[in-house]
Image (cartoon, helix red, strand yellow):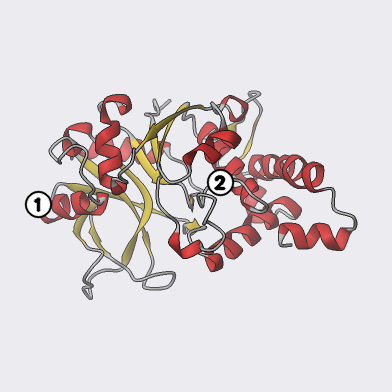
Amino acid sequence: MTRMPPIAVLAGGLATRMRPSTEHLPKSAPRSRRRTFCRASAEAFCREGIRDAKLLVGYRWEQIELFVGDGSRFGVQVDYIVDGPTLLGTGGAVRRALQRLGPEFLVTYCDSWLDSPYAPVVEAFHASGRPALMCVFRNENRWDASNVQFENGVIRCYSKKFRLPEMHQIDWGLGMPKASAVATRPMDEPWDLAELYEELATSGRLAGYEMARRFYEIGSFEELAETNRLLCAFCFRAPSSFVRSEAPRHNDQRGRQGPLHQLLVERLGRSLKYDEVYLDAHASVAKAKAGIGA
């Protein structure tokens, strides 16, 4: 069994695309439909065998802590690492957290729903012999502009600024660096993690792993609505392709084994019960469906 490293969750942004809803809330804070997303993300870490999550927080982070707590009810140990008065950006936040992350770690974003096994990513990173790995998805400019040139397990080019015809993939939202790769950057200064990835790709030192399933996000109102529909669809109906016998099987917190999406349906159904039915007490079925976006 693959030993899973800690995961750093980048959750310190100002969420300007979600204003005015995020004027008093961070975008990852659980409110209304986002409660299900937050719970599902935490339980997904547990499902994948990740027991140590570091939330790299900043803007109104106390409200995240109010809901997530120490993570014990999700089966994950959660620690909070706060930017301080100056937001450090994605790279600066990771650099500040290095001593608490260990020699290698996964890193993702608080507004990304990534429904794929993580263990193969860790195995690919170890097999690559490179200082960092980026997960990619063959996007072909469908969900956003493709920004990665990927060949034979290596990221040949990555950029958030310019595009090449050879760029068919997009960064999927999950990476795995060695602490030594991040430690070369300045401490307590704002910088973007993409800068490090670009530098490593240019020198041929950034490994890649191609994911089969697309990513989902809640970084804008449109993305939130799309992701909410996906999660609600998992709760109310499970297509046969999600629960077929050859689907990947995982153990849940109680040691029960089942197809990946079958366990996800069960967990999200429980989330709806506690986060919508009990808290909001909808007066009718129509109001309940409107409340969860069904």
Foreground residue, 5 or 191? 191
Kind of element beneath mark 2: loop
Foreground residue, 10 or 4? 10
- Residue 50 x/y as whole percent: 46, 30
In which quadrant of the rendered image does the N terminus lie?
Answer: top left
Name which quarter of the figure residue 291 lies in: bottom right
Above or below residue 140? Residue 179 is above
The residue indicated by pointer 1 is: 203
Q: Earlier in the sequence, mark 2 or mark 1?
A: 2
Above or below residue 146? Residue 81 is above
- Other-residue count near label 1 (Cα within 10 Å), few / some / many at <14 / 14–19 / ≥20: few
The residue indicated by pointer 2 is: 29
- Check the image and name the residue furthest to the right: 284
Name which quarter of the figure residue 268 lies in: top right
Q: Are marks 2 and 1 in contact (CB under 8 Å)?
A: no
- Residue 230 x/y as whole percent: 62, 59
- Other-residue count near label 2 (Cα within 10 Å), few / some / many at <14 / 14–19 / ≥20: many
- Check the image and name the residue furthest to the bottom: 165
Name which quarter of the figure residue 177 lies in: top left
Residue at coordinates 55% horizontally, 40% vertically from top-left?
A: 63
Above or below residue 222? Residue 219 is above
- Check the image and name the residue furthest to the left: 203
Instruction: Say whether residue 142 is left or right of residue 90.
Output: right
Foreground residue, 27 or 168? 27
- Residue 281 x/y as whole percent: 84, 48
Alpha carbon separation for disc pair 2 and 1: 38 Å
Instruction: Say whether residue 168 is left or right of residue 112.
Output: left
Amino acid type at image mark 2 = Ala
Residue at coordinates 30% horizontally, 40% vertically from top-left?
A: 93
